Image (cartoon, grey):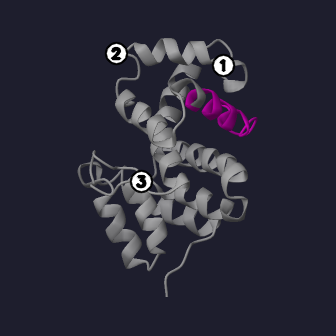
Amino acid sequence: MHSVPTMEEAWALLQEYNQEEFHLRHARIVSGVLGYFAKEYAPEEEAFWRVAGLLHDLDFEQYPEQHCIKGREIMEERGLDPKLIHAMMSHGWNLTTDVEPENTMEKILYATDELTGLIGAVTLMRPSKSVSDLELKSVKKKFKDKKFAAGCSREVISQGAEMLGWSLDDLISRTILAMRSLLPEMDI
């Protein structure tokens, strides 16, 4: 029997493989962003979307060279739902896997994973250190600067927006709003 863990179970699983605060924080942010978008696109699946966001980088801290591949093994060993495994695998499309994002949740995960990192880096440069007053133009300026937060793939972000049929501005603006919805407990 395949299962979808509760948020508490997913958090415990994540902590088995991740101890660095950076990775744990990123998982919570992506989970919250997916939960925000789920309210609009699939309210009945919000819990699933949040768990997918929490576990998307399950293996990254310990197995960066086998990212998504090792995650699949861990999830399969635990008998987790194949839909959850597919979502996790698809966020590594054309990077570490050939599993393409198929549904809205997978496409949003793919598009926002890197983008939340970029937005977080821009936020750290601001006097407020908060997304509460962050504007689209600030993120776009840093998006164009390839040296800034160089680990955040602009190509993946752009591809994700295209996949969703959204403009890049729309994706960035909506992701800022999603991250704001996590305040104050998730202030960066």
Disc 3, SS = loop
Location of residue 176 in the rendering, given as x and y in whole percent from the top left corner: 64, 30
Q: Nearer the viewer, mark 2 or mark 3?
A: 3
Tell whether 141 sits left or right of 94.
right
Q: Nearer the viewer, mark 1 or mark 3?
A: 3
Sequence-first tag of 1 and 3: 3
Amino acid carrying label 3: it is: Pro
Residue 188 in sight in this render: no
Figure check: 48 above or below 111: below
Residue 170 in sight in this render: yes
- Tell me which residue sits at (43%, 33%) in the image: 157
Figure check: 70 above or below 117: below
Sequence-first tag of 1 and 2: 1
Residue 119 colored in magenta in the image = no
- Cα separation, mark 1 vs mark 2, equals 20 Å
- Tell me which residue sits at (56%, 45%) in the image: 30
- Looking at the rendering, the stretch of residues picked out in magenta corresponds to 171-187
Q: What residue does disc 3 label?
A: 101
Amino acid carrying label 2: it is: Lys
Figure check: 75 above or below 95: below
Location of residue 35 in the rendering, given as x and y in whole percent from the top left corner: 66, 51
User: As rendered, which of 142 and 104 lies closer to the eye?
Assistant: 104
Outermost front residue = 165
- Tell me which residue sits at (49%, 60%) in the image: 14
- Cα separation, mark 1 vs mark 3, equals 29 Å
Residue 177 colored in magenta in the image = yes
